[in-house]
Amino acid sequence: MAGYNQFMFELLNPQSALHTQAPQAAFFHLDGDELLNVSLDDGTIKWEKGMVNDFLTQVALYARSTPATTIILSGIVLSPFTILTHLNHNSGISVPRIQETVNRKIEKTAREHANIHYFDFPAIVTHYGLESLVDDKFWYLGRIKYTNTAYVQLARHLKSLVDAIHGKTRKVLVLDLDNTLWGGVIGEDDLQGIQLSEEGIGKVYRDFQQHIKDLKSIGVLLAICSKNNEADAMEVIEKHPMMVLHDSDFVAKTINWNNKADNIRRISKELELGLDSFVFIDDNPVERELVRQNLPDVMVPEFPKEIEKLNKWFISDVVYPFFPKVILTNEDNVKTDQYKRNIQRKAFEITLDLNEYIRSLNIKLNISLNDKSQIARISQLTQKTNQFNLTTRRYTEGEIGQFMDDSSKRVYAVDYSDKFGKEGIIAVVIIDILSKDAIHIDTFLMSCRVIGRNVELSILESIIGSLSKETPLKTIQADYIITAKNSLAKDFYTKCGFEASGSRVLAKETLLSNLSTLQHG
């Protein structure tokens, strides 16, 4: 926390904590009224344009000098009621227009730097109201402008944004059906009795389904876990004219009379995703508590007691804390289809032996080098991938961009497709060039969606083969850093001909021949 009105000192002084402590993230939240000092002079409105420009210039310099630091710039808010009264919107002078101008400058600065992100404080003010967020008493007593409500909401939304930046988001939304996705119980009310319409309570549920469908469109997987007769439930999903969600929107369904905790475990196994990727929504408090007790990794939010509050609750208490987004990649748009194809692959695999199955997939890999159009996806994979990740080093977009500009590094992204369809970027390899004949593999990771198809062997062989064409390699170093989730990858390097050497593994001239034997054998 900087001292009062010391933000420029922190930015300009190389000995300040902002520079010397190398923070993971820096949050700049400035008081718009104090920063801009809006005033009238002979009927002309004046404000501190220079201060805003100087501040944003220094933030940009700081961002470029510290690419590993995530910088969050808050939008500013000006007091809406001023001495201008109705002049604000009925003349050429306008405080709201100044606020909009400044926030556009802040957003522009964020867009121009991979490690700067915009924090939408004006949206918080719009939702909660400035009157509930500001306390003039404490402002004049101690320059403390905000109420406890303001600090709580700043913290909640800041955490949501930081989680989104660093990929700490859930992947699967599991939904009950009766009195959750629609009003009523299909086993008792029949199709005509289900509340799902454009009026009243039925409209609440229809809007809820639209929000869920929108969530699916940005990469969240949807699943059903319901105690019901499957035929009855599917009749609503397939035949009710007001359904927004359809069978094709769900990547997995368990509609039966079994224990819901067991059914969620089954979905987890089918999708090959950990339970810590799941959020479960159910109107029944008994079912919620059952899942909490048996599956503590699954997040189970409370369901609103007043159904009219369902949609606001969903946005504020489910989407923001568990599914925040700061970027949208091509892979996010087709996530459901990707997982459905993976389920098809597994079903196809059962009919063949492993080698025959892999050959029959007709796998194609396209490996790109330092492709800046892939920075967002590469960063996303370093943040999210755990199981086949040899080091679990997390990198921001700013750091990935810096690596691509560094002649001593190589950043590879691997695009995958097979006869079932495209999977997009599924693997990342980051190489340090130590000398003309030595390299170090800083990062080797691969999405769990393609594990078990020997893809990792082809990737390593291709990349090292490509580097060997630039200059003959004598030494290849790599790291395996064990975590709670990456034991799957612990033998990867040894299988490829590496030998342990302290905390690292080494491979010499025999590596390529070993790789070829493994791959083609």
Image (cartoon, rainbow, N blue to C red):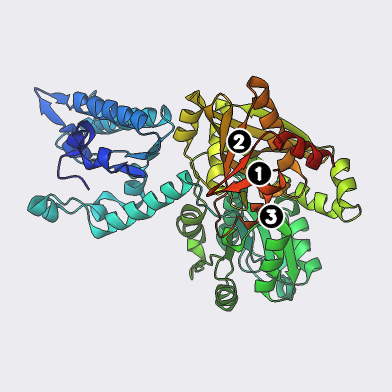
Q: Earlier in the sequence, mark 3 or mark 1?
A: 3
Is residue 374 visible in the rendered image? The answer is no
Of residue 116 and residue 452, the one placed in the foreground of this image is 452
Residue carrying label 2? 476
| Mark in front: 2 vs 3 | 2
Could you tell me which residue is drawn at 16 percent across and 38 percent down?
A: 34
Q: Helix or strand or loop: what does disc 1 sit on?
A: loop
CA separation, marks 1 and 2? 8 Å
The local crowd at label 2, few if under 14, some if 14 to 19, many if 20 or more residues have their Cα within 10 Å, is: many
Q: Is residue 207 above or below residue 382?
A: below
Q: Position of residue 305 (x, y in %)?
A: 48, 71
Quadrant of image for the C terminus? top right
Q: Is residue 33 above or below residue 147?
A: above
| Mark in front: 3 vs 1 | 1
| Residue type, mark 1 in image | Phe
Could you tell me which residue is drawn at 90 percent across and 52 percent down?
A: 353
The local crowd at label 3, few if under 14, some if 14 to 19, many if 20 or more residues have their Cα within 10 Å, is: some
Q: Position of residue 459 (x, y in %)?
A: 70, 36
| Residue type, mark 2 in image | Ile
Of residue 6 and residue 356, the one placed in the foreground of this image is 356
Task: State left or right for residue 212 relative to residue 226.
Answer: left
Residue carrying label 1? 498
Residue 257, quarter of picture: bottom right
CA separation, marks 3 and 1? 55 Å
Task: State left or right for residue 21 relative to residue 187.
Answer: left
Q: Position of residue 252 (x, y in %)?
A: 72, 58
> Of the numbered discs in the image, which one, if any, rests on residue 366?
none
Residue carrying label 3? 243
Could you tell me which residue is drawn at 55 percent across and 73 percent down?
A: 292
Q: Is residue 290 above or below residue 122?
A: below
Of residue 93 and residue 421, the one placed in the foreground of this image is 421
Q: Are the residues flagged by discs 1 and 2 in contact, CB closer than 8 Å?
A: yes
